[in-house]
Amino acid sequence: MRLVVALSAAVLLASALIYTSFSAASPALSPTQLLRQAQPGRSYQVTGTVVHGSVRHEGNGLDFSVTDRAGGGTAIPIAYTGTVPDPFREGREVIVTVQKQGGRYVGERDSLITKCPSKYKTAPAGEKQNY
Amino acid sequence: MADLGRICLPLALLVCVYGIGASIYGARTGRIEFSDSGRRSVYALAIVLTVAFGVLELAFLRNDFAFNTVADTSSRTTPTFYRAAAVWSSQEGSLLLWAWLLSLWSSLALFLVRRRMRDVAAYATAILLGFGAFFISLMIFYASPFSTTSPAPAEGVGLDPLLRFPTMMIHPPMLYSGYTLCTIPLAFGMGALLARRVDADWIKAIRRFAFAAWLFLGIGILLGARWSYSELGWGGYWGWDAVENASLMPWLTGTAFLHSLMIQEKRGMLKVWNVSLVLATGTLAIMGTFLVRSGILNSIHAFGGATLGVPFVALIGVLIAGSIYLVVSRRDMLRSQHRLDSLLSREAIFLGNNIVLVALCFVIFWGTYFPLISEAFTGTEASVGPPWFDRYTVPLALLLVLLSGIGPVIAWRRATLANARRNFAVPLLSALATLIVLLAAGVAHKAFAIAMFCCAAFVLGSISQEFFRGTRARRAMAGEALPVALVALVRRNRRRYGGYVVHLGIAVLFVGVAASSSFQHAVEQRLPVGGSTHVGKYTVRYVRPTATITPKNDAVHTGSTLNIGAVLDVSKGGRHVATLSPSEGFYDSGEPAQGTVGHLIGGQAVSHISMSAGVTRDVWTAIAPDISTPALQRIVSIGNRTLPADEGVVALGVLAREYLKHPPAAQFHFIVSPLVMWIWIGGLIVLGGGLIAIWPAPSAVRRRVAMRSRARTARGLARA
Amino acid sequence: MEILIAIIAGVLLAVVFVVISAPLRAARDVEDGDVGASTESEQALQAAATGRGYERAELEAARETKYREIRDAELDLRTGKLSREDYDAIDSGLRAEALELLDRLEALEPLEQKPSGESLTPGKANPELEA
């Protein structure tokens, strides 16, 4: 009897967990996908490369543009406020959570992650690894 | 020199293969010489890998850039201290470190049980060598630390400046020790199932191993949190990053195991549960290693390429399938011998603790691997952020702390209800008093923090009561002075009182976490020289800029070429509190394409934070100076055009002087967090308590106790 | 340099071989009738490896645990977690289980001297230890 109670409680908790995770999650999109799919008011995780020459300090925030990691595609301007990680610079891969507001993409506070330049290379010698 | 390393790896693999064969043969035929030979293979493996590691370490220290690894992660300008640590900053080096630590810890564990549990130990040896073979094969076929380029490049890329912090030396080896130590209980668990021998002797041995794993993993996690907080320019100690979570999960299951093992010891229950826990801990440790190596999840620590992912998934698949098969096929010998006497017993509380810990682990597991799960189900990769994690882990953490306060008050086996009710008085009063004080202080809106403080007060009350009563009982028995009685009490009941100390440490740690997250003040502001801003009750003023140039081979600093910072004055209510000097270090990128001067500061910039740590609060400051103003950029471009290749440093001097003369406004990040120091203090208390709990009593004492008990045992029964 | 590496590699190989093969060579020596100091330790090894050795280790571990439980129950009484009646019931139960373990242990040992130096003479409570 006790086992049944315990298991049902566990199943209930797990279902609550699973449900909220799907609704609270932000899908990861590339800038091209974002342009196509973004709906205002929903959060999305954009993964892209910071465009050279696009970084500007605006008051307490940061403006920059990202393009697809694979290169090409349209650049998306993002207005971001919050912590800027050390590795952040032009040409680096970043992940930032944004919401579409009007025509702009506003970055969620403190959501900017910059990927550490890959220190682990498994390619054989002679092959250049993209940093 | 690389040749020696290249010989060591296949030799190590051969030793592993032989050891696996000899151990299994010895276990199945009962011929001890083969089991012993298998055990000694582990020792031999440790010797060979030590030589291999030594070769690699030497290469780094000697700047032997023929080694690809050295060329990729070190340079002549990297200070010696960091060159030595750079060994494990690369994929190949960290694989070697993992294998080496595995061989060392396995040797120690097997040496300690060399006379007992021979068949269990033999199977365990085979499994541990299997792990060794896996990692060595990865090195031989995928990522060799000993691959070379000829001719050797003149200079290396250099260690990523983000890693040039002292904790870099300790955190990975400690964490890897934790991970590798988790495989030892797994091996002994599987060994026991294979040998069909899950019993009291096995419990004694595996408890030690599980505790060592718990200890080192805990230290590794704490160090990582501390590194993140006090050395990275982020200002936090835990971000629910995938890699952080990966190390926490085996620690949680390991903690659960240490508790539920006691239930199995006393009541012969929960055998299936315990075996599953120990197998899960080892598997989670391998999964943690996999997460860090394979870059399969987006993470700040996204190391590694996808090439390693496939072998790891295969290994994890084998582990999970093997575990399930073993547990299911041996389930008759894992049947419980007894049931719980009563729900009001310490055993029941331990069970509750286990449930909460496993629930925590499941939540974290779900959130961490969610991108993969959602991709499997919906096709899009989506991830959950810290708010989602907090929502579920905070209530569970509250429950955990509360349970650790209830446990000490309840007796083993079957507590007397009336006594228990009485014993709750003091802890409840402490919690109530804390609640009243906090409400009076006007912080009612921070519900979770208040709840945690009250739970911690509850724990403090119940544990203090235990120490007090125990000491009083001891004095009544032996008439000793107070301090002597206290020490004797702890010495004679290490497991109990050591455990109490651990729980006290956890409560303290969570108080620190609650306070520093709920009552934190953070400000991001652009300030000119002389400007100031308010952070909570503190005022921070930008006094003046700093700029230093560090010569190329400066080992005191981290090898930065230029350091731009600020002197800040921190005051509270008009009174001076601290003077802090955060700075940003610029590093050589090693790319001549950026220009003679440009490359000197074109590398990874690293924030050197400055912090005033105090018992009640930490004041944390970081600066991101602006060197992209037209005036400063002009200096760089003029230097690029006019200076010869190796005299770029001159321009840096001009740059520094110009910055000091006309400093532009800089971006600052200030954080005032209360009670952060108590997180580290709590962690130390936990570790100290753990050591007390596991410390073996000297054998003379044990013999005396045993003999006396024999006599008294007989007498006690005669009386009854 | 090459010679140095070759020498080190050779030494390493030799060390590995010696370490791994030691038990195998010792076993072969015993089989060849090489009687000496190795015989006794060999016997002890064999004895420990037998089922009886396992059972002894198992019973000893269980006994230690049982003693610890008895002491824990007493401490629970003294720190006010158990009433007198509950303690007496639990205590006599534990002591009965402990005596059963001791009986089984004594049934195991013939004339061997236990390595720890302890020799429990069955049935006799040592008067010096009355405390």
Image (cartoon, coloured by chain):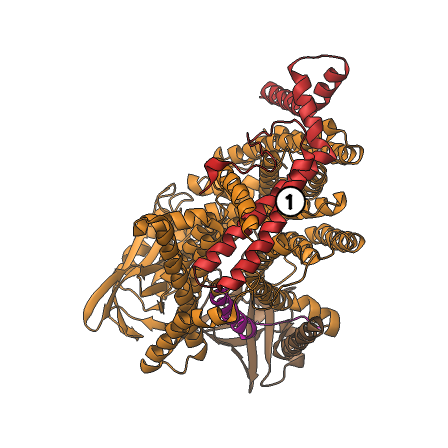
Chain colours: A brown, B orange, C red
Query: What secondary structure is the magenta-colored segment mainly?
Result: helix
Give the vertical position of B654 relative to A67 (above or below).
above
Direction from residue B328 to residue A66 in the image, left or right: left
User: In this orientation, which residue lies closer to the viewer: B693 or B618?
Assistant: B693
Residue B38: give x, y in percent of width and height. Answer: 70, 32
Give the vertical position of C5 relative to C58 (above or below).
above
Residue B276: give x, y in percent of width and height. Answer: 69, 56
Q: Amino acid at mark 1?
A: Leu
Q: Which residue bears the numbered disc 1? A: C101
- Residue with the most extreme front position: B719
Check the picture and name the quadrant holding the N terminus of chain A. Answer: bottom right
Residue B457: image quadrant is bottom left
Give the vertical position of B390 relative to C92 (above or below).
below
User: In this orientation, which residue lies closer to the viewer: B586 or A25?
Assistant: A25
Is C22 magenta? The answer is: no
Residue under the point 64% across and 68% down: B366
Q: Secondary structure at mark 1?
A: helix
Q: Chain of mark 1?
A: C
Q: Label 1: few (<14), some or many (≥20) within 10 Å?
A: some
Residue C96 visible somewhere in the drawing: yes
User: In this orientation, which residue lies closer to the viewer: B32 or A52?
Assistant: B32
Q: From which residue to which does the magenta span run?
A: B380-407
Residue B119: image quadrant is top right
Direction from residue A106 to residue B17 in the image, left or right: right
User: In this orientation, which residue lies closer to the viewer: B32 or B143?
Assistant: B32
